[in-house]
Amino acid sequence: MNNKGKKNEAVLVLEERKFLFGSRFLLLANTRTLKAKDKLNAQLNAEAKSSAQADGRDAERVGHRRTDNADSRDAILKANANLQNAVKAREELIEILSTPNPEHMRAKLTTWVKLYSSVGISQLTKFTRTITNRMEGIVSRALAPISNGRIEGVNGFIKALLRSAFGYQDFDYFALLIWEQTHRKKSQNLLNSNRKKRSYSRARPYNRKRLKQTVFQLQKPTLKDAG
C-alpha cells in the first residue's frame, strides 16, 4: 500500500471515529431503554417550554433534551454492518438467557451459535466457541437463575479496603473488619427491630407542618386614616 492509500485509510478511520464518538451509551443500551428515554425527554422539554411561557421567558432557550437517541442508534447501526450484527446478537442472547425451560434454551443457543459463528466477526466467533464449550453451565441458568454479582462486589470491596489501608499486619482483624462491613446493614436491621417504635401522628400539634405564608392582604383604610 502506497502513501496515498494509507492517507485515504486514515481519513476513513477519522471520519468513522467522529461518527462513533460519544455514542457508547447508544450502543450499550437496548432499544426499549432508548425509546423510553426519548419519550421522557420529550415530556420534560414540553413542560420546560410551557413553564417558560407562563413565566414570560423565551421558550426557545429551554427544553433542549435529546429526543433522537433511538434514531441515532439506528443510523449508526445501518452505517456499520459489524456493529449491527454485534448489537443484534447481544439482544437475542439476552432474550435467550431469560428462557425458563432448559431444553428450549439449549435449542435456541445452538441456533444462535450456528448463526453468528459465520458472520465474519472474529470476536463474536470466539464468543460462540466459548458458549459451545460451556453450554451445560449456561443452560443450568434456566433452573437456577443466579449470578456471581454479589461475590464479585464483595471481592471488589475487599480490594478497596486493602488499598485504603496499604495492607494489614493482623489477618484476624482484617477478617473481622470484612465481616463487620459486609454485615453492617443486617446488624442495623436487628438493632432497629429490637427498639420500640414511637407512634407518629399528624394530629399532634407539634407534628403539623407549618404553612408558609404566600398571600399578603393589605389592611382596609379606616376613617381615621382617611382623616
Image (spheres, helix red, strand yellow):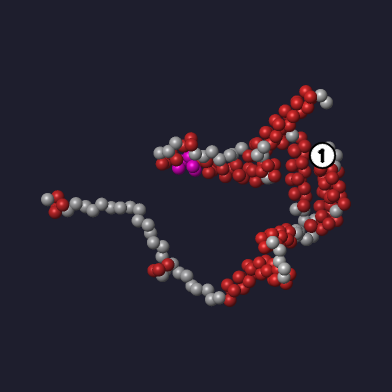
Task: List x then y, in percent, for residue 34.
Answer: 64, 43
For this rendering, which residue is in front, 11 or 226? Answer: 11
The vertical placement of 72 against 178, above or below, is above
The vertical placement of 33 against 176, above or below, is above
* Quadrant occupied by the N terminus: top right
Q: Quadrant of residue 28?
A: top right
Task: List x then y, in percent, for residue 14.
Answer: 71, 31
The total number of labels drawn is 1
| Residue situated furthest left in the rendering | 227
Q: Quadrant of residue 20?
A: top right
Task: List x then y, in percent, for residue 225.
Answer: 15, 52
Task: List x then y, in percent, for residue 171.
Answer: 73, 70
Residue 49 belongs to magenta span: yes
Residue that mark 1 sits on: 121
Start and end of the magenta stretch? 47-51
Tell me the chief SS of the magenta region: helix
The residue located at (78%, 50%) in the rendering is: 96
